[in-house]
Image: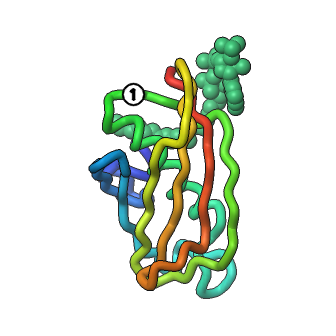
Amino acid sequence: MCFACSPRNPIGLHLQFSLEDGVCRTTFTAGEVHQGWNGCMHGGLIATLLDEVMAQWLWLQGIAGMTAEMTTRFSRPVPVGVPLEVTARQTGGRGRLFELAAEIALPDGQVPVHARAKFLKV
Ligand SMILES: CCCCCCCCCCCC(=O)SCCNC(=O)CCNC(=O)[C@H](O)C(C)(C)COP(=O)(O)OP(=O)(O)OC[C@H]1O[C@@H](n2cnc3c(N)ncnc32)[C@H](O)[C@@H]1OP(=O)(O)O
């Protein structure tokens, strides 16, 4: 029962994903229960959104992959209560290794956080 995407997980994020033109996409609005600092989304949960959208870039193409490495740049706080657009795309890779990048965009287009990761097909 995936914490990020299972509709049956009672404490999960219930994310839904689409893949179009090489971009995997989901949306999420953090609530007070997802805060770290007051008014700001918890960084670990931000990383979860980014990790999951990259994993789903693979999964929606029939590839089961596990995160082998991930770097996250937190440039600005992510506010709670606003709809976030979370996207991922491939940046490289060879063989079993897939290199992906993901970002979170605010409604005004600002990108407060982005990530890069390496996934290995399992
Ligand atoms: C129903 C809905 C479901 C929906 C599905 C969605 C699921 C969402 C899950 C979200 C994603 C996650 O969080 S996954 C959970 C977090 N991640 C993990 O727990 C992964 C833990 N790590 C592992 O289990 C393992 O290390 C693996 C599977 C990643 C790799 O192990 P392995 O398969 O044995 O491969 P290994 O021999 O180590 O490496 C193979 C080759 O890749 C290279 N390699 C390994 N790591 C790296 C790296 N970071 N950067 C460069 N290269 C690397 C090695 O040097 C080697 O090169 P060469 O010698 O071949 O040249």
Residue 44 location, quadrant = bottom right
Q: Position of residue 26 (x, y in %)?
A: 36, 60
Residue 27 coordinates in the image, percent (x, y): 37, 66
Compare residues 33 and 112 and report the one nearer the observer.
Answer: 112
Tell me if 2 is positioned left or right of 18 in this view: right
Colouring convention used in this rendered image of the protein: rainbow
Q: Is mark 1 within 8 Å of ligand 1?
A: no
| Residue at position x 66%, y 75% in the image | 36
Q: Residue drawn 65% across and 66% down? A: 43
Q: Position of residue 34 (x, y in %)?
A: 54, 72
The quadrant in which residue 82 appears is bottom left
Disc 1 target residue: 63
Instruction: Say which element carries label 1.
Output: loop
Query: Residue at horizontal 40%, vertical 42%?
Result: 57
Percent across and percent down for residue 31 are 47, 78
Looking at the rendering, in which quadrant would you find the N terminus? top left
For this view, does 114 lie left or right of residue 17? right
Ligand 1: image quarter: top right
Report crowding for label 1: few under 14, some 14 to 19, many 20 or more residues within 10 A (C-alpha).
Answer: some
Quarter-of-image position of residue 92:
top right
Q: Residue at x 59, y 36 (%)?
A: 67
Check the image and report above or below for 101 versus 13.
above
Label tally:
1
Q: Is residue 17 left or right of residue 30?
A: left
Amino acid at the residue labelled 1: Ile
